[in-house]
Image: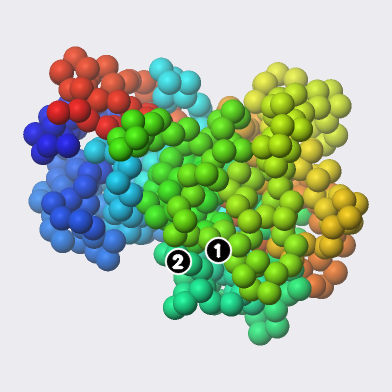
């Protein structure tokens, strides 16, 4: 794409009329490995290693992962403006995206307040580079884990896979633990002895400050027990950009950024093949792993090349190499679609009936998570004729549904976490809490921020009016046409 085309788009996106919608914009830099960030009052160029130059205000200067934490601080500073917000690890998190040739010409970073009502937006939002939308919880507990309680710091999504690989005593893949590794081992949680197995729970779309506060208040006893018996990161787990679902599921399972593992967003575009790629949809979840780069490996593949052992993946699209995976039932045609496999809201134990009946997404997600509990308990007991898994990954999606519906501070958002805690406790009871042999990792793929329902606007309309020719994927990945 020509510089003139990018400049024309930026002139519209960073204009006064869209200042309530657009926080900043990211583009490729002038050389390979370089990227740029643009705001109305300044810009900067950078690589993954750091800043190259800044003109006016550096849009990415504030990178404090502890900003707006704990919850009281977050609530006192809801939806801050761009010059007060924080973008942890921003140079690396932003530059990595453009290492993939399918990256957009312009990645638009929405303001915290923006409610995407024109595109089916939600009260709770994520996808941004900012700290609240990027900050997920991280709890590591059980066998082989140090009992340090709260750590006053942050981890990164790409640190999850190398840390789990270390717990599994995996063999290195050359100079690193994984075939491609952007993250680091979180040495401060690793004990001397290794556990026999690792179980990871990804609680989709969870605000870290809210989960920690509810656990401290006694509302989430299963989460609280894992926190008390292990180590948890007070400033959370920072997602790679974009802070979207499958981009970060895959980052957690491979240790690679989206710009390296191949799943760039929920939807993106490949100019070379003129193909729209949609990963995060009920019709395509079981196909998403086909977008994984051959240059990366999942934790299931790490176990396979490190002496083997049975691994399982429950309700997780990034399942390449897994011995048991929910989505194989769809790939083999044994289940026609996910909706047909789910129980009705009335028959779901542990679901808050008020919201399961009233909100379709809440009932749907409750059904999916109920089936996850059934699958996990069957796998753990060997009911399918399988050995006990060396590595088990479980995706629980209700927090995302509840937080999208009402925002992370809402009754429905809190109910989703309480229902998830009940299911987590049911699973852990069935596992006898690991019997002293199992390490547990609890994380989310991204955080969640409450938007302002009165903050509306569609930058696509402004771009079209200005004569900019483009396609917009996932509402923010702009591919421009000369």
- At horizontal 20% and vertical 56% (from top left) the residue drawn is 32
SS of the residue at dot 2? loop
Q: Badge 2 local density, few (<14 within 10 Å), some, or many (20+)?
A: many
| Mark sitting earlier along the chain (1/2) | 1
Percent coordinates x, y for residue 276 in the rendering = 40, 30
Percent coordinates x, y for residue 191 in the rendering = 65, 80
Q: Looking at the rendering, which quadrant does residue 478 occupy?
A: top left
Percent coordinates x, y for residue 284 in the rendering = 56, 32
User: Count of labels shown?
Assistant: 2
In this view, the residue farthest toward the bottom is 192
Which numbered tag is attached to residue 209?
A: none
Left or right relative to 33: residue 283: right
SS of the residue at dot 1? helix
Percent coordinates x, y for residue 196 in the rendering = 76, 73
Left or right relative to 354: residue 435: right
Frontmost residue, 159 versus 482: 482
Q: Badge 1 local density, few (<14 within 10 Å), some, or many (20+)?
A: many
Frontmost residue, 334 versus 402: 334
Q: Which residue is mark 2?
A: 181
Residue 205 appears anywhere in the view: yes
- At horizontal 30% and vertical 46% (from top left) the residue drawn is 101
Residue 90 appears anywhere in the view: no
Q: Is residue 290 above or below residue 474?
A: below
- At horizontal 67% and vertical 37% (from top left) the residue drawn is 331
Which quadrant holds the N terminus?
Answer: top left
Which quadrant holds the C terminus?
Answer: top left
Q: Which residue is mark 1?
A: 161
- At horizontal 67% and vertical 55% (from top left) the residue drawn is 322
Looking at the image, do the residues carrying marks 1 and 2 touch, with CB atoms under 8 Å apart? yes
């Amino acid at each position: 794409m020509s510089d003139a085309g990018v400049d024309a788009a930026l002139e519209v996106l960073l204009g006064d009329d869209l200042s309530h919608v657009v926080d900043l914009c990211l583009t490729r830099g002038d050389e390979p490995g370089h990227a740029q960030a643009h705001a109305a009052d300044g810009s900067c160029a950078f690589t993954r290693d750091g800043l190259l130059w800044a003109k006016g205000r550096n849009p990415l200067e504030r990178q404090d992962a502890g900003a707006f934490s704990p919850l009281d601080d977050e609530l006192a500073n809801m939806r801050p403006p761009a010059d007060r917000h924080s973008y942890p690890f921003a140079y690396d998190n932003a530059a990595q995206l453009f290492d993939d040739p399918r990256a957009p010409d312009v990645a638009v970073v929405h303001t915290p307040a923006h409610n995407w009502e024109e595109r089916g937006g939600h009260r709770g939002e994520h996808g941004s580079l900012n700290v609240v939308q990027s900050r997920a919880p991280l709890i590591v507990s059980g066998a082989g884990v140090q009992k340090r309680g709260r750590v006053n710091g942050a981890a990164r999504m790409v640190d999850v896979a190398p840390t789990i690989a270390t717990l599994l005593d995996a063999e290195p893949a050359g100079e690193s633990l994984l075939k491609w590794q952007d993250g680091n081992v979180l040495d401060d949680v690793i004990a001397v002895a290794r556990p026999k197995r690792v179980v990871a729970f990804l609680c989709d779309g969870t605000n870290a400050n809210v989960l920690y506060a509810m656990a401290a208040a006694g509302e989430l006893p299963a989460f609280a027990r894992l926190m008390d018996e292990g180590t948890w990161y007070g400033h959370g787990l920072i997602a790679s950009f974009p802070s979207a679902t499958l981009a970060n599921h895959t980052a957690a399972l491979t240790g690679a950024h989206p710009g390296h593992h191949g799943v760039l967003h929920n939807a993106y575009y490949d100019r070379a093949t003129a193909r729209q790629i949609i990963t995060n949809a009920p019709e395509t979840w079981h196909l998403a792993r086909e977008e994984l780069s051959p240059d990366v490996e999942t934790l299931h593949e790490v176990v396979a090349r490190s002496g083997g052992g049975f691994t399982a993946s429950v309700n997780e699209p990034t399942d390449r190499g897994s011995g048991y995976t929910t989505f194989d039932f769809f790939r083999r045609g044994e289940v026609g679609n996910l909706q047909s496999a789910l129980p009705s809201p009335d028959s779901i134990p542990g679901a808050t009936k008020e919201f399961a009946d009233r909100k379709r997404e809440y009932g749907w997600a409750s059904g999916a998570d109920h089936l996850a509990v059934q699958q996990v308990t069957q796998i753990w007991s060997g009911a399918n004729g399988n050995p006990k898994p060396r590595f088990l990954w479980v995706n629980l999606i209700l927090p995302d549904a509840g937080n999208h519906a009402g925002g992370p501070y809402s009754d429905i958002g809190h109910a989703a976490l309480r229902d998830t805690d009940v299911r987590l406790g049911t699973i852990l009871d069935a596992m006898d809490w690991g019997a002293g042999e199992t390490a547990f990792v609890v994380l989310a793929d991204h955080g969640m921020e409450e938007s302002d329902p009165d903050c509306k606007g569609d930058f696509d309309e402004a771009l079209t009016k200005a004569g900019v020719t483009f396609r917009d994927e996932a509402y923010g990945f702009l591919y421009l046409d000369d």
